[in-house]
Amino acid sequence: MSDAPISAGEQPGRWVAVCARERLTQHRIVCATIAGVGLLVVADGDQVHACERACPHEQADLSLGRVADGRLYCPRHLAWFDLTDGHISPGWPSRALRRYPVRIAEGHVWVDAGAL
Ligand code: FES
């Protein structure tokens, strides 16, 4: 995550504001959609992450999960995903969680739509 402002020299339209930063003080998980792709913005302490919304195991809605100690827990089978690299907890036959670049700038959370 970067605190650098979005600069005019970056690819136009690539960074999309998905929610106000303030919302993450009230909710640890915020849902968003960019170009029809569901994603989550997740606050873990002072860290902010963005990731896919559907669990890669059996597509449970991860917005109904919980966040603790750098992990996002799936509500269906309680596997967890490491928010720093997306890896699933040991023993689960699933790919890693897709994560997207995220920035805080101008009072908003921005996600790199080019990474979707
Ligand atoms: S559906 Fe998420 S761990 Fe199984």
Image (spheres, helix red, strand yellow):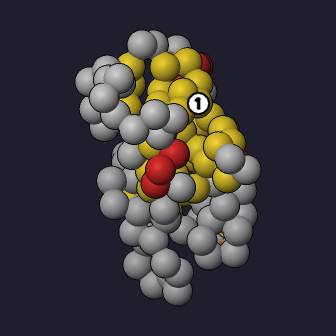
Mark 1 residue crowding within 10 angstroms, few (<14) / some (14–19) / many (20+): some
Q: What residue is rendered at 46% in x and 54% in y?
A: 115
Q: Secondary structure at mark 1?
A: strand
- Residue visible at 41% across and 62% down? 86
Q: Is residue 42 left or right of residue 31?
A: left
Of 55 and 72, the residue lying toward us: 55
- The quadrant where residue 33 appears: top right
Above or below, 31 against 77 in this view is above
Q: Is residue 76 left or right of residue 83?
A: right
Residue at 61 percent across and 60 percent down: it is 74
What kind of residue is marked 1?
A: Val
Image location of residue 16, percent across then percent down? 53, 33
Q: Nearer the viewer, residue 113 or 86?
A: 113
Does residue 39 appear to the left or right of 82 in the view shown? right
When the figure is inspected, residue 48 is found, relative to residue 78, above or below; the finding is above
Q: 4 or 71, which lies in front?
A: 4
- Residue on which the image places disc 1: 18
Measured as percent of width and height from the top left, residue 63 is found at 67, 47
Quarter holding residue 89: bottom left
Residue 77 location (% of width, % of height): 65, 70
Query: In the displayed structure, would residue 91 be above or below residue 33?
Result: below
How many marks are shown on the rendered structure?
Answer: 1
Q: Is residue 8 visible?
A: yes
* Res 65 seen here: no
Q: Which quarter of the image is occupied by the N terminus?
A: top left
